[in-house]
Image (cartoon, rainbow, N blue to C red):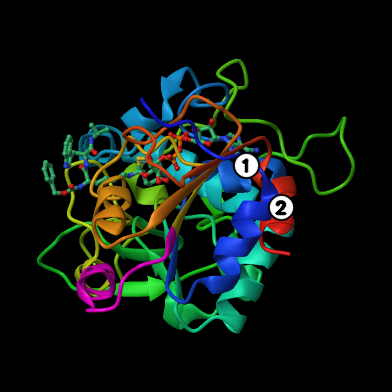
């Protein structure tokens, strides 16, 4: 494109200081240095299946046991790691700036654990720690941090590692116990169907309350000063579309990504690109 993004902290700090309405769009790269894998690229395979192929209603219908192994493991890993300095820096900005809103694609619960104010943390793709009935006609939902989610999904301990470590069942060379439907979590309300994780799979609608929060923020008469696009490949919709919508309301775009050629829809004058680890860069940017 005609414009090269700015890369200096100073011009970013100057703009942030003047900003009143700021959005952050978060993706898996934010939690990478906490030790959680991203979806695309290295680490995006789970037992030689693409993680994104497991994130579908079809994968759950075909093999609910494998799907639950995947999600129970992700819950365990998410609970085992800690928020990193970027999660804390974003939470701090949210406490300081009433016009700051986070739209997170992450389901790992790390922003919540960093004390991000919940009224301005909108979870576009749900969370691993909500469970709901897999039958849409049943409205059962619960918040659930039990690890393992049911005893049959307990991950074997890794004897070669420090106490508390589990074997890496994302590696297809590691044997998985075989499961029957009976072993999986069931809905206590309809007592017939399986529970499923309260995340948004491909082809499913995002939570209506969350869509409405984003829509209201973008429709407000006041301009948006800035959107920070942190650790996301911005390939998944409607999340990716918020970048263009924020631009249309006047926002400058600041991308923080390990991969320096990840411009979401090309650069415009006044944008920033900070290439590197979000856990290092975001605290510098928000200092
Ligand atoms: C670092 C780093 C470090 C690494 N520091 N950076 C319009 C056009 C085309 C298609 C569609 C469209 N509208 C809807 C669709 C269909 C579909 C879609 O978007 N498809 C595209 C892939 C083409 N969207 C949907 O189906 C959505 N539903 C919907 O729109 O409903 C209505 C409808 C349906 C069908 C048709 C039309 C309308 C739902 C999307 C749900 C996405 N769900 C998942 C799984 C959640 C559950 C789970 O966790 O298992 O969400 S998929 C997966 O991708 C997950 C993520 O939140 C999401 C985004 O991934 P993210 O976070 O960007 O991760 P990566 O791995 O892609 O990128 C990581 C980045 O970090 C990289 O750039 C690295 O470089 C960087 N990085 N380490 C900084 N240390």
Q: Residues within 10 Å of mark 2 (few under 14, many from 20)?
A: some
In the displayed structure image, the side of residue 67 where residue 153 appears, left or right? right
Question: Image point 48% across, 40% down: which residue?
Answer: 69
Quadrant position of residue 147: bottom right
Quadrant into which the C terminus falls: bottom right
- Image coordinates of residue 235 in percent, x first then y, are 33, 34
The vertical placement of 177 against 203, above or below, is above
Location of mark 1 (residue) = 36
- Image coordinates of residue 160 in percent, x first then y, are 87, 30
The vertical placement of 208 against 65, above or below, is below
Quadrant into which the N terminus falls: top left
In front: 133, or 52? 52
What span is colored magenta in the figure?
212-226
The vertical placement of 167 against 152, above or below, is above
User: Which secondary structure, mark 1?
Assistant: loop
Q: Is residue 154 visible?
A: no
Q: Is label 1 in contact with label 2 (beta carbons under 8 Å)? A: yes
Residue 214 sits inside the magenta stretch: yes
- Image coordinates of residue 140 in percent, x first then y, are 25, 73
């Amino acid at each position: 494109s005609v414009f090269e993004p700015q890369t200096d902290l100073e011009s970013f700090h100057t703009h942030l200081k003047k900003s009143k309405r700021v959005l952050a769009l978060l993706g898996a790269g934010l939690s990478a240095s906490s030790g959680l894998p991203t979806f695309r690229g290295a680490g995006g395979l789970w037992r030689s299946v693409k993680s994104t192929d497991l994130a579908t209603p079809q994968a759950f219908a075909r093999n609910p046991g494998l799907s639950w192994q995947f999600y129970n493991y992700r819950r365990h890993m998410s609970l085992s790691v800690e928020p990193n300095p970027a999660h804390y820096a974003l939470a701090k900005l949210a406490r300081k700036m009433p016009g700051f809103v986070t739209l997170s694609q992450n389901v790992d619960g790390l922003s919540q654990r960093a004390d991000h104010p919940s009224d301005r943390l909108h979870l576009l793709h749900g969370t691993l720690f909500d469970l709901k009935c897999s039958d849409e006609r049943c409205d059962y939902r619960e918040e659930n941090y039990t690890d393992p989610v049911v005893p049959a999904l307990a991950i074997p301990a890794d004897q070669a590692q420090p106490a508390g470590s589990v074997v890496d069942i994302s590696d297809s060379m590691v044997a998985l116990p075989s499961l029957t439907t009976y072993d999986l979590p069931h809905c206590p309300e309809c007592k017939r169907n399986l529970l499923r994780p309260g995340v948004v799979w491909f082809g499913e609608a995002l939570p209506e309350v969350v869509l409405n929060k984003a829509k209201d923020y973008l429709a407000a008469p006041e301009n948006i000063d800035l959107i920070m696009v942190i650790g996301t490949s911005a390939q998944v919709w409607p999340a990716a579309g918020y970048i263009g919508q924020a631009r249309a309301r006047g926002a400058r775009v600041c991308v923080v990504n390990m991969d320096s050629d990840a411009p979401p829809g090309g650069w415009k004058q006044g944008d920033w690109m900070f290439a590197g680890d979000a856990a290092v860069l975001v605290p510098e940017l928000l200092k």
